[in-house]
Structure formats: structure tokens, C-alpha cells
Image (cartoon, rainbow, N blue to C red):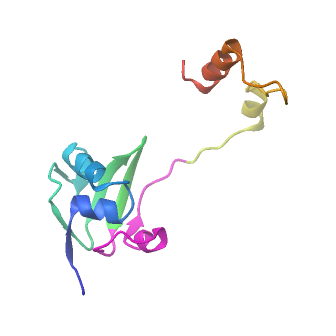
Amino acid sequence: MSVNRNRLDNWFWCARFVKSKTLAGKLCRSGTVRVNGNLTKKAHFNIKVGDVVTFPLGIQIRVVRVVRISNRRGPYKEARETYADLTPYPKIEFSNSLRDRLPVIEPIRGSGRPTKYKRRQFDRFKGKM
């Protein structure tokens, strides 16, 4: 059966951008999703092949073109064929001098769990504090 349209929230779920239909609906209603450059707040917005969908996913803004409409949530390989990724990825280069400046915190084997002091040091290093 050939399908040429699908709901936006269902397509997000079938393309495996979100883990559940509930999260897909929340993403659509958040007011941050654009279809062909137009902002939409509707989870029931119909998309078709060729539409360009822009949405935030984590800390990144994803831009994808709908290549195929699917009725079911299949395996990843099948889901990946439903869209073409147009996201411009930032080029990140790490120099050796940057790596040399980072502190190395290595646990001593057999020392057990980290102390509160060591854990806070590690959290500061990761930027959580």
C-alpha cells in the first residue's frame, strides 16, 4: 500500500527521532518545529514526500527532507531510509595542545567508589557544577 501523507508526530516516531508517540506529540506542540520554513504547533500536521522539516533534537538543530512516508516503526535501517539528513554539522578539531591542558583524573584500580571530594572534582571537570 502506497502512502503519500502522514501526521507529523507519527512520522517523527516512525523515523525514530523520538522514543514514543507521546514525546513526538510534545515535540510538535512545542512550537519549535518548522515544515518548509513555516512554524507549526500541530501534531496532526500532514507532511508529504519532499517536505523539509527543521526541529531541535538535544542541543542540535536537525534539518531533514522527507524521502518516504512509512506507516510503521520498523528497524533503524528502514527508518533511516525515510529521510535525507541536511543538517550542517560543525567541524570540531581538537589540537594536541588542548588535550595536553586537560587534567587527567584516573581512578586507582581496586580503590572502590570515589570519595565525595573526588566525585566533586570529576563533576567540576565535566562542567556539571
Q: How many marks?
A: 0
Residue at position x 57%, y 23% in the image: 127
Residue 94 % position (x, y): 68, 40
Residue appearing at x 33%, y 66% in the figure = 14
Residue 3 as seen in the image, left or right of residue 76:
left
Q: Quadrant of residue 105?
A: top right
The answer to whether 79 appears left or right of 37 in the picture is right
Q: Is residue 73 magenta?
A: yes
Residue 62, above or below 93: below
- Which residue is the extreme one toward the bottom? 1
- Asked which quadrant contains residue 102, the reply is top right
- What is the magenta range? 66-90
Image quadrant where one finds the C terminus = top right
Residue located 47% across and 68% down the image: 76
The residue located at (23%, 53%) in the rendering is 34
Query: Secondary structure of the magenta portion, mostly?
Result: loop
Q: Can you say which quadrant of the picture contains the N terminus?
A: bottom left
Q: Nearer the viewer, residue 73 or 121?
A: 73
Where is residue 81? Give x, y as percent.
42, 74
Residue furthest toward the top? 117
Residue 62 position within the rendered picture, expressed as x and y whole percent measured from the top left: 38, 53
Q: Is residue 58 magenta?
A: no
Q: Residue 11: x, y in percent?
A: 28, 64
Above or below residue 32? Residue 103 is above
- Left or right: where 81 falls relative to 101: left
